[in-house]
Image (tube, rainbow, N blue to C red):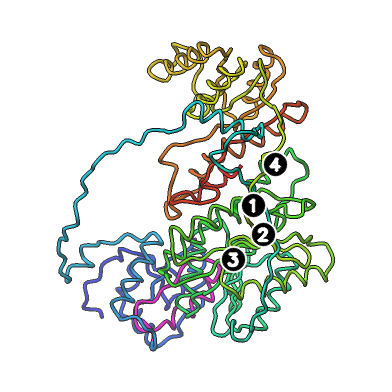
Amino acid sequence: MGTINWKKPQIPILSNVKGEWLTGLEIACPAYWADHLSKTVQFHQSMEHLARLDEPVLLEIGPGRDLSNLVSRYIDKKGIILNTVKSEGEEDGDYSFLIKRVGLLWNSGIEWQWNHIYDSRDRRRISLPTFPFEEKLLKNELTEQGALGALRELVQLKTGGAQNEEVYTIGWKSAFLAPVDREEKSKGESILVFTSSHPVCSAFLKLIEGESGKVTRVACQNSFDNSVESSYGINPKRFAHYTRLFTDLVYKGKRPNKIIYCWSMDNPKAESDSKAFARFKAAQTTALFGLILLARAIKEAGIIHDIELTIITNHLYSVTGEEPLFAENSTIMGPLKVFPQEMSFLKTRNIDFSISPYGDQHVQERGARQLFQAIQDPPTDKIVAFRGEKRWIEQFDVIELSGKMPLLKTNGVYLITGGMGEIGLQLAEAIGRDYKAKLILTGRRLSVPGLEGGEKGDSILHALQRLSAAGAEAMYLQGDVGDYEQLEEVFRLGENKFGKIDGIIHCAGIVDEKLFRTVLESDESNVEEQFQAKVYGLINLEKLLENREPDFCLVMSSISTILGGLAFAPTQLPMLT
């Protein structure tokens, strides 16, 4: 060893001889290597140094995962550990196993020299079918008369004459749940339960673990933890924790057939309505954002077999009309409708209860039995609600358009948020022409001609001229509905000029194409932009209308809340209003 021309290491080396990081040319001394052969290995001391690293990425070189298992005892709450050679009995081929590890390391932030990875493998250019780029313009079929007719049907319940379209409302019907063969249904299934502190979840776990031997729990906590077999703890805000969870499940042969997501049962509380924003944001950690990270991690782990994802909620729907509601968790509607459209292997459903965590234990245990029985069958019913002993499924009922409620009136004062948008402006023009109304239009554009310039400034002036020609008296006020102070100023200025506001039409929203992303492309920032108008704006409207008495407040929505659609998961809740 003394004849070797040693150089100072270029990367840090954690020495099992000294139990610490090497600082210089200790390895150049022959005595160091003699100690390596003859003295006690300082593995424990070395691992204590390794455990101080922030979320390390560790790769075991060589067959098996003996070292990985030893190291995991020291960093079981953080980091990712991977081996490079498959263990005996694994189905993957050697190359497939290795290349998957390359992908997992890349997903953890490791940069690769890809040309070296594929040096020994032939790559050929493949010709794909060409695209003709045949542009086709689709004209907006929403005319002024059509917009006004739609508005009348909604706020006037117009009667008489033929109706081109039926008007629907969400309803519920009682449905029988057939008993199942528990032993047959549970046999061989791997079930992953994201656990809640709600007593229904606790009682359900006792039932499911008694019937199936392959149940894995995932608790919501700050740090990653797998110190107990078949039990994990992850931070719902950390995508790395989700990926590590599913990577570990795949390695251990526990790919889930069913995921029971109970995290959305725990409804965050606030001391007063003034904390509505904070309560809503807190709910999204385990509702919309948690589900998006969950789906992304499943995809990243390479799991593509069929999975039933059951999302459990509490107090989400008004079935009997007497339940307390927690509408903040309505965000789960996006994943519920869109996940199966973007990832066909995910089959989703929502099961809702209305059970207090502080109520009757008998009622809580009944809810657990209902949940256990419900998950035995495939998710053919997308939305199910249990109320008492009854099981209800969502349906759409046709409204009988009888009677008349004339809410729009001549010379009425109407506030239209997003009034410079295409639909908002068409409604304004039609209402102004038919009712000679006084209109307050809001938008985020600057309202002073000349300061903004260009097409935007001209379009505002042109729109006001159109409304004036139609017979309306209109004013435009710049203001973001998601900002309470700006919306309050809109109300103040509008009322100072026109007097009491008779009705509000909430059209504000963001239709920027870049915000419509698939689940794998979504992040919290672009979803927050959607929340600004439709969620935070609605909260602000509710507060500002507490001491006002308008005839109506009409909130515009989208058919995507019913049908879903590609790239609609992050945007569906804002439209759900």
Kindly identify which residue carries mark 1: 329
Q: Is residue 64 magenta?
A: yes
Q: Amino acid at mark 4?
A: Ala
Q: Which mark is residue 310?
A: 3
Q: Secondary structure at mark 3?
A: strand
Kindly identify which residue carries mark 2: 313
Q: Is residue 90 above or below residue 383?
A: below
Q: Amino acid at mark 2?
A: Thr
Please tell me how many numbered marks the rendered image carries: 4
Q: Secondary structure at mark 2?
A: strand
Q: CA distance from mark 2 to mark 1?
A: 8 Å
Q: Secondary structure at mark 1?
A: helix
Kindly identify which residue carries mark 4: 276
Instruction: Please state which of the two labelled residues, at mark 1 or mark 4, is closer to the viewer.
Output: 1
Q: Is residue 35 left or right of residue 496?
A: left
Circle 2 packing at 10 Å, graded few (<14), some (14-19), many (20+), is many
Q: Which segment is the magenta one?
A: 61-87
Of the numbered discs 1 and 4, the one sitting upstream in the chain is: 4
Q: Is residue 123 left or right of residue 31?
A: left
Say if mark 2 contacts mark 1, CB within 8 Å. Answer: yes
Q: Position of residue 440 (x, y in %)?
A: 60, 19
Q: Residue at 81% x, 68% y: name it.
A: 363
Of the numbered discs 3 and 4, the one sitting upstream in the chain is: 4
Q: CA distance from mark 2 to mark 4?
A: 19 Å
Of the numbered discs 3 and 1, the one sitting upstream in the chain is: 3
